Amino acid sequence: MTLPRPGSDADETRPQRYEWRFVVEGADIDELGHANNVAYVRWIQEVAAAHWRAAASPEQSNELVWVAVRHEVDYDAPALPGEEIVARTWVEAWTGATSHRRTEIVRARDQKVLARGRTIWCALDAHTRRPRRVADAVKERFLEPTG
């Protein structure tokens, strides 16, 4: 199996997209009356974790844990209290022990993109906590079924 490298336009695979819906809570709001930047980073982490739990096998979940090594977030519009939000995420590419993940945060009612995120996650052996190369069997669980 050949997986695209970060930034490539390779069409060999289609990443599985995962969605998570939630409502902006009062605790997410800052002094400007909209969701704080920290809330967006938390949402990006939570949707990635939910995607991992949904896609990985129990054995894979017991063998690997993930840590974020880089977050980039572009903010396009505010999220307001009580709004329903959809966080969409997918793994764009894999390199050794890392996954390069994209996330979009959109307002559910009109699909307005509120923020876009790029995160590099590093896989760690669950027992040693040392970086661990991601096996093809794990990567395949994050691809759309073919055929």
Image (cartoon, grey):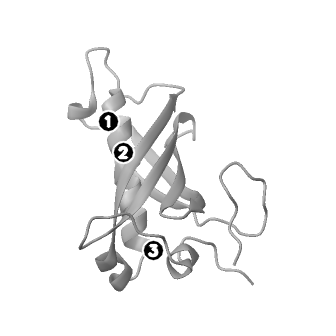
Give coordinates of residue 51: x percent, y percent: 43, 64
Question: Residue at (34%, 85%) from the top-left corner?
Answer: 59
Callout 2, which amino acid? Trp
Give coordinates of residue 60: x percent, y percent: 38, 80
Quadrant location of the C terminus?
bottom right
Q: Secondary structure at mark 2?
A: helix
Of the pair 14 and 131, the residue shown nearer to us: 131
For the residues bearing labels 1 and 2, Cβ distance under 8 angstroms: yes
Give coordinates of residue 138: x percent, y percent: 49, 77
The residue beneath circle 1 is 39
Asked if 104 appears above or below 112 in the picture, the reply is below
Quadrant location of the N terminus?
bottom right
The residue beneath circle 3 is 55
Give the Cα distance between marks 3 and 1.
Answer: 24 Å
Of the pair 58 and 87, the residue shown nearer to us: 58
Question: Residue at (38%, 49%) from the top-left corner?
Answer: 68
The image quarter in which residue 27 lies: top left
Callout 3, which amino acid? Ala
Q: Would residue 82 be visible to someone looking at this image?
A: no
